[in-house]
Image (spheres, rainbow, N blue to C red):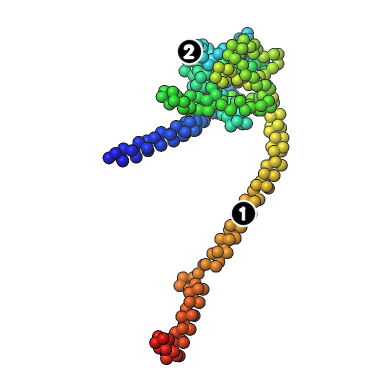
Amino acid sequence: MKKFLTILILILLAAAVIGYFVYPTVSDQLGRRRDAEIMAAYRAKTAVMDADGKTELFEQAKAWNDSLEQVRMDDVFTEGTSRTSRDYQNRMNVHDGVIGELVIPEISLSLPIWHLSTETPATRKLVHVNTSSLPADGIGENIILAGPGILQAEGIPGEIGLTDDRMLEDLDSMIPGTLIILNVTDRTMVYRVSGIQMLSAAGLKEMDLTPGEGEERMTIISPRKDRRLMVQAERIPVREARTLLAEEDQATFPENWKNVLFLGCPVMIAGLLVLLIIELIRGRIYRLPGEKRPEDEEQQEITGEKKETTEKNPDRIEEVEEQ
């Protein structure tokens, strides 16, 4: 019984250790799947909207932007998010509070963008900050998005340091020139990163983020302990974005070809040599059913010769036995 309890405790400890390391990865994958389902429902609703309905959405967003005297950033990462107005919640609300989708190919990021509210705080979701411009697909905008880097798990898992979604964790690795894509209904807006800064919460709150005349900007904010990471980007035409991506592919093609040449060829040659050795071995040992091995045939010949000698000289065998 004592031995059984010892084994049981060891199994439970091993399961706990494995679960501790596996939980963040599994939880992150489940979160990505959940986000993909939300965006699928969002696209399904936008697909059935007529042109007038979509135009109305952007006109509502433009009216909201015109009502803003100044674009600023409150510290939305503190506990106790203030309640936003019903008027704000109803603008660009296509599917259960989702405004659109943020895509950053460089870091394999794809997240739904929610209205900021007590139900969807910036500490749990990627949200649009209500003191900034809504994506009206027009000039004079600075769209501010905010969200956590790594989403801490709730309850006991969070207390022991486990995490859920890795939302804006890789935002730190972005560099100027990285492309950011904003999908709203059937429109695609592309931005290019122009600057990355690390600020204190108080310093960020004091900044005037109001866009200049004719500017179209996006700002993404994410907390890093007691500081705030701010990524600023400027909008570029979709055609220019396609050109940049094509040039990047052409620039990386020779390097990728060299990698294939210098790494792939040795692997292929080694594989061919292994196959050749296998075929040679199979050629030597492969026999038809009932076929004897060469050594068996040699042994049979020796045995036959001895037998033949015995039959021819029986007296010789008797002499040998007497000796």
- Amino acid type at image mark 2: Gly
Which residue is situated farthest in the left direction here?
A: 1
Rendering coords of residue 200 (x, y %): 59, 14
From this viewpoint, is residue 186 visible? no
Q: Which residue is rendered at x = 44% and y = 32% of the image?
A: 20
Which label sits in the foreground, 2 or 1? Answer: 1
Q: CA distance from mark 2 to mark 1?
A: 62 Å
174 or 101, which lies in front?
A: 174
Which residue is situated farthest in the front direction here?
A: 323
40 or 160, which lies in front?
A: 160
- Amino acid type at image mark 1: Ala
Count residues near mark 1 (Cα–Cα under 10 Å), then give few for <14, some for 14-19, many for 20+: few
Count residues near mark 2 (Cα–Cα under 10 Å), then give few for <14, some for 14-19, many for 20+: few
From this viewpoint, is residue 168 visible? yes
In the rendered image, which residue does mark 1 sit on?
Answer: 270
In the rendered image, which residue does mark 2 sit on?
Answer: 80
Q: Which residue is rendered at x = 31% and y = 37% of the image?
A: 5
Which residue is situated farthest in the top direction here?
A: 69
Q: Quadrant of residue 129?
A: top right
Q: Which residue is rendered at x = 63% and y = 8% of the image?
A: 69
Q: Is residue 284 left or right of residue 262?
A: left
231 or 112, which lies in front?
A: 231
